[in-house]
Amino acid sequence: MLKAAILGATGIVGQRFIELLHHHPWFKIEAIAASERSVGLQYSKAVKWKLQTEIPEEVKDLEVLPVNPGSIKNVDIIYSALPSEEAGRIEEEFAKKGYIVFSNASSHRMDEDVPILNPEVNFQHSEMIKEQRKRRGWSGGIVTNPNCTTAILTLSLKPIKDEFGIKRVIVSTMQAVSGAGYPGVPSMDITDNVIPFIRNEEEKVKIETLKILGDPWKPADFKISASCHRVNTLDGHLEAVFIETKRKADPKTLTEVMAKFQAEPQRLGLPTAPKNPIVVRHEEDRPQPRLDRMEGKGMSVVVGRIREDPDLEGVKYLVLGHNTVRGAAGCSILNSEYFKAAGYI
């Protein structure tokens, strides 16, 4: 069992880390850290627990530690659920001390030598950690997972890119309020409403998708346009995707390719990897967040309404994923599992 510390443990993503690491066969929560207002308190006293499960007994009485390497001892890996505005410097401090940090923050995603890892899509990018250590002169490292929207989108795009090639992607998203963290979007703003703007989200979707679906040091060369919207759903991002492919893709073949898709996490039997990372639904009104967000324990994406788009000379579909599981804590944990299985830790 490797010992893990969670930074930013009282937030929504931090809570997801705790929930998903409970009874994990490879990793044990040894330390939790959060902001100054929580330091010194028992975790159960410091957190406003918002998940439907109960706080695991193993962490209830853990003392909340300061978020710095001097306070956290005897751990093997670090999970970061810190806010992006705080994460950059702190994650670097842990990497300099020899820890591998699996980060949910955006601070280092676009650093040239830092992988944005979505393991079924680009596990090969793990090799970037060697160059990162060489350039920066540290024995640890930083591995990021994608923005939640990007994680869902790129998982659905991977088998299409491999089979047909991609010339252009247009995506319009309907994103759950939990993606804004806690307390998130004020109720008077989101109730009976859709907010057609999420700051920096469209830019993240574009640049992260191209980095993930490219080679380790060279972004993909297709065009991508995103429009992102906040909707009154608790969990689960739904995305309408329109694709122009390099080779003609018919809905029947596309369905088969996506339904049978598996990758390195499935071949290695990683604990958090879903058997089917892409689940295809054939009903005309699926996927739906309330019905489908927990597919594969929240680690699968669900695709439906695959059909031709003659005007775009391509195909279109809907994809749904759980934004705080596949799109956040679950992806970081899967990244750490792959690093362990591949011998990086």
Image (cartoon, rainbow, N blue to C red):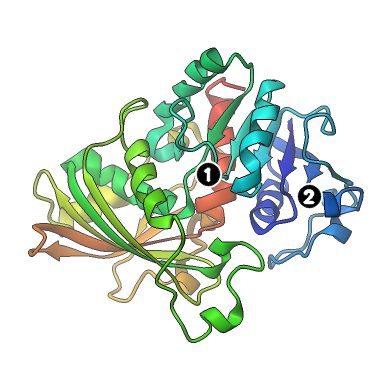
Q: Residue at x 63, y 16 (%)?
A: 139
Q: Quadrant of the C terminus?
A: top right
Q: Residue at x 84, y 58 (%)?
A: 46
State which quarter of the image contains the N terminus: top right
Q: Residues within 10 Å of mark 1 (few under 14, many from 20)?
A: many
List x then y, in percent, for residue 95.
65, 25
Q: Nearer the viewer, residue 263 or 344?
A: 344
Residue annotated with mark 1: 106
- State the residue in front, 188 or 143: 188
- Measure the C-alpha gap from mark 1 to mark 2: 19 Å
Residue visible at 72% across and 22% down in the picture:
97
x and y, in percent, of residue 156 in the image: 33, 51
At label 1, which amino acid type do we have?
Ser
Asked if residue 34 shows in the view, the reply is: yes
Task: Classify 123 as above or below 249.
Answer: above
Of marks 1 and 2, which one's residue comes earlier in the chain? 2
Q: Residue 35 — which label?
A: 2
From this viewpoint, is residue 277 visible?
A: no
Q: Position of residue 93 (x, y in %)?
A: 69, 28
Q: Amino acid at mark 2?
A: Ser
Q: Secondary structure at mark 1?
A: loop
Residue 330's place in the image compared with 236, above or below, is above
Is 65 in front, or is 335? 65
Dot 2 surroundings within 10 Å: few (below 14), some, or many (20 or more)?
some
SS at circle 2: loop
Q: Is residue 281 left or right of residue 12?
A: left
